[in-house]
Image: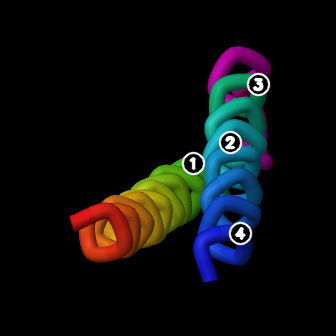
Amino acid sequence: METVLNILLGMALIAVLLVLATGLVSFVKGGEFNRKYANKLMRLRVAVQAFALVVLLALLVLRQMTHA
């Protein structure tokens, strides 16, 4: 289970990085894409970060339970 959570956490962190980078590039370039998707990308980033935090907390709880 710990391995699955580690992989899931890594994937979530990469997803956060990709969404953040997409949003930043869009913001710098401006234009129609930025006007259309800037707010959606921000919300997606927050959602993915929340998911990453939940996975991290689950991993910490699992480790605490197995090492206690």
What is the C-alpha distance between the residues marked 2 and 3?
Answer: 9 Å
What residue do we see at 77% from left, 43% from top? 18
What is the C-alpha distance between the residues marked 4 and 1?
Answer: 34 Å
Q: Are marks 4 and 1 in contact (CB under 8 Å)?
A: no
Q: Are marks 4 and 2 in contact (CB under 8 Å)?
A: no
Q: Amino acid at mark 3?
A: Val
Per the picture, the main secondary structure of the magenta-coloured stretch is helix
Give percent across and percent down for residue 33.
Answer: 78, 48
Q: Identify the magenta region.
A: 27-35
Which mark identifies residue 25? 3
Question: In the rendered image, which quarter contains the N terminus?
Answer: bottom right
Q: Are marks 2 and 1 in contact (CB under 8 Å)?
A: yes
Element carrying mark 3: helix
Tell me where residue 66 sits by quadrant: bottom left
What is the C-alpha distance between the residues marked 4 and 2?
Answer: 37 Å
Give percent across and percent down for residue 47.
Answer: 44, 68
Q: Callout 3: few (<14), some (14-19), or many (20+) C-alpha neighbours within 10 Å?
A: few
Q: Which residue is denoted by mark 1 in the rendering?
A: 38
Q: Which residue is denoted by mark 2 in the rendering?
A: 34
In this rendering, position of residue 21 left or right of residue 52: right
**Residue at the far front in the pictured view:** 68
Question: In the rendered image, which quarter contains the C terminus?
Answer: bottom left
- Report the front residue among 49 and 40: 49
Q: Amino acid at mark 2?
A: Asn
Q: Earlier in the sequence, mark 2 or mark 3?
A: 3
Which mark identifies residue 3? 4
Element carrying mark 4: helix
What residue do we see at 78% from left, 20% from top? 29
Q: Amino acid at mark 1?
A: Ala
Q: Are marks 3 and 4 in contact (CB under 8 Å)?
A: no
Give percent across and percent down for residue 24.
Answer: 65, 26
